[in-house]
Amino acid sequence: MSGRTQQVSGRKTGRSKRKQLPLWQETILLLGVALVLAIVIKTFFVQAFYIPSESMEPGLILNDRILIQKVSYWGDEEPERGDVVVFKDPGGWLPPVDSAGPTNPVAKVMAKIGLYPTGGHLVKRVIGVAGDTIECCDDQGRLVVNGQPLDESDYVKRGGASCNGPMPTNGACDEKWSVGPIPDGHIFVMGDNRSRSADSSQKMCQSDETECVPGDEFVPVDLVVGKVFVLLWPADRFRWNTRPATFEDVPDPTP
């Protein structure tokens, strides 16, 4: 009996010798793990951004907080018509103040790991992809993609214009315009607030322009960061973002 008692007592003594990390060391370890996870999530999965202008009204308003997901564009997958995407400034699309990003030191660190919106990005809707031809507009003021009119009444704000593509002609919707075929590896994007959006249509060269560079209206898909999938804040306007059904009717471009 005494021998067994000594063995049990020895095992208890062995357990009591296991050391626990001090609280401050555990805290640092947990913060390090959380930091690594945040960086991985930002790099491969989800990232936070904000709406930098009024160009996506009425659905997305200035300073709305949104989340984008990157999974849809893994590998060879590219943005589809109707997606609302965040992309890096192709050059000259944003004024310097919108390209600067956060100035607060804490916000800068949080932006690096994807927990705070960063600057230098734009949010627009994909209207056309490689090979597409876009025309403005039919008799009802609708954009026409590959011969198919788009019913965008659920999300477009015309802002007093009589068509859904007024930017290239300064609101003169009786003046027609067209673009395409869109080059491989590029997309044509527009804001939902069609009269107040510096988008692909606004970057198009007009016949009377002498300093415009043809092709600046197209956004390289390599600059696309991800697809907007949720309006996160303000909380009372929280909603999931989905692709409008009208884009499902657009036929593939003819060779």
Image (tube, helix red, strand yellow):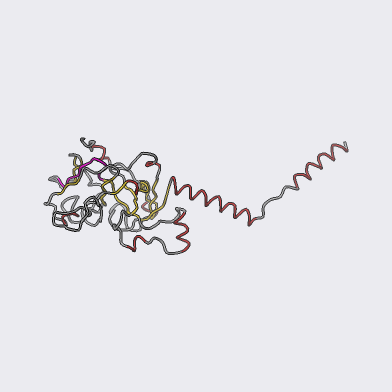
Q: Is residue 128 magenta?
A: yes
**Magenta residues, as a range?**
127-137
Of all residues shown, which one is farthest toward the right? 2
Q: Which quarter of the rendered picture does the N terminus lie within?
A: top right
Q: Could you say which is closer to the camera, residue 241 or residue 217?
A: 217
Query: Where 88 falls versus 71 (above or below)?
Result: below
Which residue is depicted at the point 81% across and 40% down? 8
Q: Position of residue 32 (x, y in %)?
A: 56, 52
**How many tags in the picture?**
0
Does 50 sit left or right of 8 as displayed?
left
Does 248 sit left or right of 166 as displayed?
right
Which residue is depicted at the point 43% across and 45% down? 45
Q: Could you say which is closer to the camera, residue 66 or residue 106?
A: 106
Of all residues shown, which one is farthest toward the left? 174
Q: Position of residue 228 (x, y in %)?
A: 36, 48
Does 56 sit left or right of 29 as displayed?
left
Q: Which quarter of the rendered picture does the C terminus lie within?
A: top left
Query: Where 56 falls versus 147 (above or below)?
Result: below
Query: Where 57 falls versus 187 (above or below)?
Result: below
Q: Could you say which is closer to the camera, residue 156 or residue 236?
A: 156
Query: Where 71 falls versus 200 (above or below)?
Result: above
Q: Position of residue 160 (x, y in %)?
A: 18, 56
Which residue is depicted at the point 45% across and 54% down? 115
Q: Position of residue 53 (x, y in %)?
A: 30, 58
Q: Is residue 117 magenta?
A: no
Does 203 sit left or right of 79 as displayed?
left
